[in-house]
């Protein structure tokens, strides 16, 4: 199955920054859609994720480091779904990255407008994501951390619904939940 332009769009439906980073590798184990192919993709993702207000030049090393962080996040959170505790070396990676300064925050002269600015290049981006993952882990999200039930998707997300019964990565647009509802509707109508 080929990859189209829509497949490469970033997804921000996980309800956590660290899980949104994990979704930059889509359809893991199926089509393995890589959404961070270039340093420019990383620059765009940081802005679209709301980490920075404007793109900051990234290097190929920054791209390699964000992919390494993503790999650690996937190991930790997919392991949790299987009832496995995080490995010490993966927690060590998070702790090391989180030790750097997070993304900076400044206020404009109007005393209302906030700006998110880089501190020490992309180290602040890695730190902010690692801190988010640490906070999520510490909250023990066992019942709220889920993977999309669409076998080809499996995107990780935090179920923030009141009843904790969310099954799919998204119910809007081309989201898996919306597609599943349409498919079920069509099947019911076909039987009539």
Image: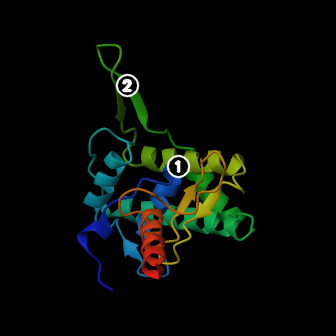
Given this view, does label 1 or label 2 mark the residue nearer the observer? 1
Q: In this view, does 159 lie above or below 3?
A: above
Image coords of residue 15 (percent x, y): 51, 49
Q: Which residue is drawn at 34% across and 53% down?
A: 45
Residue 107's image quarter? top left
| SS type, badge 1 | loop
Image coords of residue 16 (percent x, y): 52, 49
- Answer yes or no: do the residues labelled 1 and 2 have beta carbons within 8 Å? no
Image coords of residue 171 (percent x, y): 45, 58
Which residue in the structure is indicated by mark 2? 106
**Does the image show residue 27?**
no
Give whichever of discs 1 and 2 has the lower sequence position.
Answer: 1
For the image, the number of numbered tags is: 2
Q: In this view, does 118 lie above or below 5?
A: above
| Left or right relative to 6: residue 92 | right
| Left or right relative to 169: residue 57 | left
Quadrant containing the N terminus is bottom left
| Left or right relative to 93: residue 67 | left
Q: Which of 93 and 34 is in front in this view?
A: 34
Q: Distance between the residues labelled 1 and 2?
A: 23 Å
Q: Residue at x 52, y 43 (%)?
A: 100
Q: How crowded is mark 2: few (under 14 residues within 10 Å), some or many (20 or more)?
A: few
Which residue in the structure is indicated by mark 1? 16
């Amino acid at each position: 199955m080929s990859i189209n332009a829509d497949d490469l769009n970033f997804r921000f439906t996980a309800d956590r920054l660290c899980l949104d980073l994990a979704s930059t590798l889509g359809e893991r184990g199926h089509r393995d859609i890589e959404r961070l192919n270039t340093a420019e993709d990383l620059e765009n993702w940081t802005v679209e994720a709301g980490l920075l207000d404007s793109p900051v030049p990234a290097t190929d090393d920054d791209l390699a480091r964000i992919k390494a962080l993503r790999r650690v996040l996937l190991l930790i959170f997919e392991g949790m779904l299987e009832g496995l505790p995080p490995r010490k070396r993966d927690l060590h990676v998070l702790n090391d990255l989180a030790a750097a300064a997070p993304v900076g925050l400044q206020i404009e002269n109007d005393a209302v407008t906030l700006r998110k600015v880089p501190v020490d290049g992309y180290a602040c981006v890695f730190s902010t994501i690692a801190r988010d993952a640490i906070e999520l882990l510490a909250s023990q999200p066992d019942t709220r951390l889920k993977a999309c039930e669409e076998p080809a998707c499996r995107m990780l997300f935090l179920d923030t619904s009141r009843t904790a019964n969310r099954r799919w990565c998204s119910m809007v647009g081309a989201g898996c939940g919306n597609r599943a509802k349409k498919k079920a509707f069509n099947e019911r109508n076909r039987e009539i």
